[in-house]
Image (spheres, helix red, strand yellow):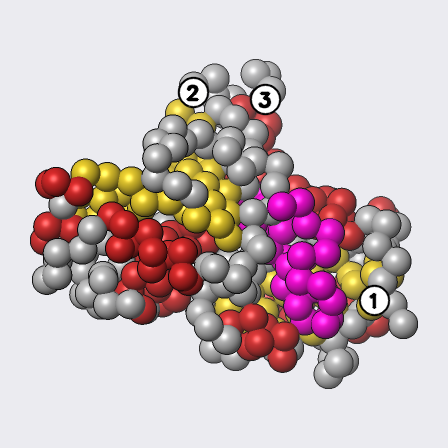
């Protein structure tokens, strides 16, 4: 039997990426709507309730509305918006986050896809919080740069079309300077830390890819941890993962495009042992493991399929 999947918002950036990963898979039967019915409430409701799995690639308010249209108790949902990432009753769709997280996703009726920035942050921080390296109340900060595709159609147009309103020919832009980015509650909750991290996101003039960096002053921790010990903890956390890999700290050159056009995530530990300074670094594709790749991975897990089917690793 095939698995019936409806992507609500299939013509957006993330939706198109998901369709690309599902194309040609014989075990997947995609439910599609003609262009003139994509915004028709009755047609959407019919498709939502006819699917075994619905993947929502919508703005937050529209995602909440879509869930309200589902009356079929057998329809399971993966929400790629940020509407449900800290909501009760939703399972967080980061399979590598905790021991047992993949099993929880497999059984869930409602799964929230992680944000791209939180994916990098949590991959670096959560194993170290769990191991007791980073105290629960530690004042964390995170710096990140993403390709402009993460900003959706408006930002893509601003970077690529010089005649578009708000067009921007700059190489780099920082934003969310008020430190209240919508990803911060997601980071705090799923890292299980006591304070929101200071989050400094930015966008570079490259289409896709992402670097996330978390500085960690080892000299200020209660125990004198070494870079090698930190790396071992991360390596143990992801030892069995086909998606997350731990790179050698010997390769100190990091590029925003290192994992672009893939669905993998790379973490590494760099720094200065002599002075007790560490930099935790994650690279990923904001449209891959940061969005569409994670959604397809969650779909595979929930449907009992090979977790990495259709992914580019």
Tell me the magenta residue range.
286-313
Left or right, 25 with reference to 124 = right
Is residue 312 within the magenta segment?
Answer: yes
Spatial CA span between label 2 and label 1 = 42 Å
Secondary structure of the residue carrying tag 2 is loop
Q: At 51% across and 72% down in the image, what residue appears?
A: 101
Neighbours of disc 1 within 10 Å: few (<14), some (14-19), many (20+): some
The correct choice, above or below, for 107 with respect to 143 in the image is below
Spatial CA span between label 2 and label 3 = 12 Å
Q: Nearer the viewer, mark 2 or mark 3?
A: 2
Mark 3 — residue? 160
Instruction: Please tell me the numbered disc located at residue 290.
Output: none
Left or right, 187 with reference to 230 = right
Residue 282 visible to an observer of this rendering: no
Of marks 2 and 3, which one's residue comes earlier in the chain? Answer: 3
Secondary structure of the residue carrying tag 3 is helix
Q: Where residue 260 sits in the image (x, y, percent)?
A: 56, 36
Q: At 37% across and 44% down in the image, what residue appears?
A: 268
């Amino acid at each position: 039997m095939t698995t019936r999947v409806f992507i609500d918002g299939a013509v957006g950036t993330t939706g198109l990426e998901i369709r690309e990963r599902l194309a040609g898979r014989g075990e997947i039967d995609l439910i599609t709507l003609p262009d003139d019915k994509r915004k028709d409430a009755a047609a959407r409701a019919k498709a939502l309730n006819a699917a075994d799995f619905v993947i929502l690639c919508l703005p937050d308010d529209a995602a909440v509305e879509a869930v309200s249209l589902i009356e079929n108790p057998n329809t399971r949902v993966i929400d790629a918006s940020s509407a449900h990432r800290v909501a009760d009753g939703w399972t967080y769709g980061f399979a590598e986050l905790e021991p047992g997280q993949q099993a929880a996703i497999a059984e869930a009726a409602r799964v929230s896809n992680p944000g791209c920035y939180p994916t990098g942050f949590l991959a670096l921080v959560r194993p170290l919080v769990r191991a007791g390296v980073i105290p629960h109340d530690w004042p964390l900060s995170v710096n990140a740069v993403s390709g402009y595709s993460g900003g959706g159609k408006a930002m893509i147009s601003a970077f690529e079309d010089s005649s578009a309103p708000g067009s921007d020919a700059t190489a780099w832009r920082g934003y969310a300077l008020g430190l209240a980015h919508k990803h911060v509650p997601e980071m705090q909750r799923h890292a299980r830390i006591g304070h929101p991290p200071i989050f400094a996101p930015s966008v570079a003039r490259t289409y896709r890819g992402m670097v996330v960096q978390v500085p960690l002053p080892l000299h200020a921790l209660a125990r004198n941890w070494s870079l090698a010990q930190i790396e071992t903890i991360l390596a143990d956390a992801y030892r069995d993962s086909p998606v997350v890999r731990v790179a050698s700290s010997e390769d100190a050159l990091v590029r925003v495009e290192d994992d672009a056009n893939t669905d993998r995530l790379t973490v590494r530990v760099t720094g200065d042992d002599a002075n007790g300074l560490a930099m935790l670094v994650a690279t990923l594709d904001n449209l891959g493991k940061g969005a569409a790749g994670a959604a397809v991975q969650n779909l595979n897990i929930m449907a009992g399929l090979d977790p990495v089917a259709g992914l580019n690793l």
